[in-house]
Image: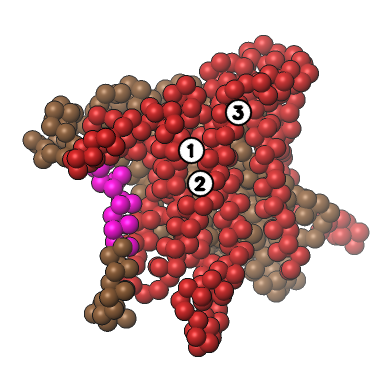
Amino acid sequence: MTARKFFSSPWRTFGFLLLTAATLLWLVPFIQAILTSVRTNQDLIARGFFSLPNEISLDSFQVAWELGGLSRYLPNSFIITLPSLILTLFFSSLSAYALARFRFRGNRLIFFLYVGGMMLPFQVLMLPVFRLTDALGLYDTYWGLIAFHTAFQLGFCTFLLRNYMRTVPGEILESARIDGCSEFRIWWQIMMPLTLPAIAALATLEFTWIFNDYLWAIVLLRSDALKPVTAGLAALQGQYVMDWTVITAGALLATIPTVIVFIFLQRYFIEGLTLGATKG
Amino acid sequence: MFREKTRTKLTPYLFLIVPLIIYLIWVIGPMFYTFYLSLTNWDGVSAPERIGWLNYQRLFKDPVFYTSLKNNLKWVLSFITIPVVAGLALAMALNRAIPLEKFFKASFYSPLVLSLVVCGLMWSWAYHPAHGLINSALRLMGLDALAQGWLSDKDLVMWSVIVVGIWRQVGYVMVLYLAGLQSVDPGLVDASKVDGCTGWQTFRHVIFPLLAPVTVIVVVISIIDSLRAFDLVSVMTRGGPFNSSSVLANFMYIEAFNNYKMGYGASISVVLFLISLVFIFIYLWRVLRTELEY
């Protein structure tokens, strides 16, 4: 439908305006954060939120980055997220292949352990996992957090990949088997390439989830030097209580990686969300 | 021949063994261990000692527990109504060719890619009593009487935080319904129009019933998400003022990690777990049903 034809109906035009208003309302928190971050705190407090700033300044970004510690926190987030992401995708593609393609005792039980586990409230795991990392000497290290993320995300990833792998036609795998291909080669050279669309969607979604985790970062890490950006921002908030320009600038900096993922991989992100919920 | 057979029988276990062990150690095992810890006086440092059901007895007398429970109920009720209705309405509105469709969709699900910490901080600033956007806007419009301490009024604070949760959840529900609408047969919709149904009647009697499976999933996910609510409360209010915005997840964290009453904290998480279990089972049951259709 062309735009002119669309707006020829007054009802449709009214609906469109309503939708536009709702959308703008939805974006207000972002807009106010951007407007706040580019002015100075004195100017903001002296002249109020609805005033034209005296000057546009990016100082708050610099303060958040250097003094606020985002230059440490943001790399930490990647150091934690990327290994967790790769490990959990690797392990879950192994277990998903077994669950999707083999009949054996315990198949369904194991599948339900994974699905049930992904729905657990995190609090029920918090204290034992805290104790476990302590006992293993992993408390307050990157590896403790990476190990937990890898393990916990196995539930959702296995669930999703297993359902996807079941849709791959069996003949392809069977003919490889007759040709004498080992099961590991079938998994790696045939199943994995065919599962790539699901893995791409899953990777996008999991990246934002692990990157945005806050609870486990504050439970399993204590040193400020190791904190990812979520925990770092919470610390920043305590440090710059009175200076909201710095806090909003920090918050905006912290969102850049996930926003980039969202802009470039939006399709995969949405696919991941819907795959997870509708295939169940 | 025999060895060949054993080998193929072993294959799935070879694929499973490493991930499954990791999962059992870090997820399933801890789940059971929490029950044990809830029966001890563990303080996080010395070895836990068993004290029977004492933690639970204390918990059921603790007023903060009941406040948290009530607040969780507020989350659940808000989450299964407002975002579901709004998300469905948006999905219906955007499931057609309209100008700027992509921009509308992206705007509504953009909050989903932000961490809850960032959402909480942005909104805390909007709620700021003196200089925040909301009170500034109200004063600008001459509605000074409505400008208030959104996060410091004990009757208001929980709702102020829930609004942020809803802001983030609507886009998610919309995405799920948009996917559900893809599987609605357009022929059925056309047929109902031919039979003289109005737009609303078509929605009410044709589309909505066809979306029932999506609605069940949406409601279950919303309930589980609202029981998990932690980050927003932790960043925006820490459960205050005077525990008035405490939720179970937050209450548990504070008891365990700020007050070092880890055994007590474990008993709170067990209660949270038992409440969630009902909904986990509903979800599992649905997964099982689609399994049997294979």
Secondary structure, mark 1, is: loop
Say which of B66 and A272 sits in front: B66
Residue B259 placement: quadrant? top right
Q: Is residue B250 left or right of residue B127?
A: right
Spot occupied by residue B21 in the image (x, y as percentages of width and height)? 72, 40
Amino acid type, residue under disc 2 in the picture? Ser
Region in magenta: A19-36
For residue B78, above or below residue B67:
below
Q: Amino acid at mark 3?
A: Tyr
Foreground: disc 3 or disc 1? 3
Circles 1, 2 touching at the beta carbon (< 8 Å) = no
Q: Is residue A270 visible?
A: no
> Chain A appears what colour?
brown
The answer to whether residue A242 is visible is yes
Letter of the chain that mark 2 sits on in the rendering? B
Q: Looking at numbered disc 1 in the image, what kind of residue is underneath it? A: Asp
Residue that label 2 marks: B78
Give the chain ID for the red colour: B
Q: Position of residue B57 (x, y in %)?
A: 72, 20
Determine which residue is flagged by label 1: A213
Residue occupying image coordinates x 39% and y 28% = B153
